[in-house]
């Protein structure tokens, strides 16, 4: 019964992510890369016609719909954090964001995956929710709908602290070490595809977890419904 519940959660999350592409009328796996490429810099020529999901703070003379707009929370030369579409039609206290590189990177399997994205994502999440509630998640290749690396910024489920122990890969003082710890654990477990969860531990560091299933579905409050 528990496994069935996990599979159902993963299916529903994939279904929600697919709604991004349907709403934007764009090939499913390329939506986030297209947004990162065309919608973050509002100073580009013909921004409002080039961008598939204009920023809510852009002057596009159209009232932005939640599912067809981009709400940027933080941006640097390398990364951007934004509202996830799952926040649309949810209560104001629901939290679900994404942190992405501003250049093409697929996911855990990509050798170009940046170490700094975890630190960036944590700092954005920390500005919005309590540190002990923060969950940073990257889903496995076969549990995701997008081929641009995106770290989910979420709240942990209440029971996540106890159920996550069996998935523990290790602890890091510096978030730049997350990929290394996760990859080593996956290799030991014989996992060719895996997802990663990062949360605060009890000694002021960070705990890293690895799972062949979706950490988003297993450990987080991913949707408000």
Image: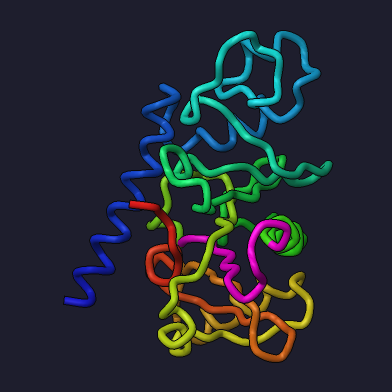
Residue 130 is one of the magenta-drawn residues = yes
Q: Quadrant of the N terminus?
A: bottom left
Task: State the residue at coordinates (70%, 25%).
Answer: 57
Percent position of residue 133, x then y: 58, 71
User: Nearest the camera: 17 or 183?
Assistant: 17
Task: State the residue at coordinates (55%, 56%).
Answer: 152
- Relative height, residue 188 to residue 198 (above, below): below
Percent position of residue 95, x then y: 53, 53
Q: Which residues are magenta?
A: 126-139
Percent position of residue 148, x then y: 57, 45
Q: Quadrant of residue 160?
A: bottom left
Q: Is residue 169 left or right of residue 165?
A: right
Task: State the residue at coordinates (38%, 70%).
Answer: 218
User: Nearest the camera: 19 or 140?
Assistant: 19
Residue 127 is one of the magenta-drawn residues = yes
Percent position of residue 87, x then y: 48, 44
């Amino acid at each position: 019964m528990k496994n069935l519940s996990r599979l159902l959660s993963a299916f529903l999350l994939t279904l929600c992510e697919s709604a991004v592409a349907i709403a934007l009328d764009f090939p499913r796996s390329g939506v986030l890369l297209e947004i990162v490429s065309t919608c973050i810099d509002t100073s580009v020529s013909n921004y409002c016609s080039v961008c598939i999901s204009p920023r809510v703070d852009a002057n596009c003379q159209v009232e932005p719909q939640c599912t067809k707009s981009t709400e940027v929370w933080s941006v640097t030369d390398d990364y951007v954090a934004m509202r996830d579409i799952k926040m649309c039609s949810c209560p104001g206290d629901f939290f679900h964001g994404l942190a992405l590189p501003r250049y093409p990177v697929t996911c855990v399997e990509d050798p170009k995956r940046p170490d700094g994205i975890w630190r960036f994502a944590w700092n954005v999440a920390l500005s919005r929710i309590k540190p002990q509630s923060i969950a940073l998640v990257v889903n496995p290749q076969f549990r995701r709908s997008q081929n641009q690396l995106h770290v989910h910024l979420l709240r942990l489920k209440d029971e996540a602290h106890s159920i996550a122990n069996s998935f523990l890969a290790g602890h890091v003082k510096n978030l730049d070490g997350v990929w290394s710890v996760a990859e080593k654990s996956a290799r030991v477990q014989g996992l060719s595809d895996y997802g990663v969860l990062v949360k605060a531990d009890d000694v002021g560091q960070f705990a890293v977890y690895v799972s062949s299933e979706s950490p988003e579905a297993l450990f987080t409050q991913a949707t408000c419904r």
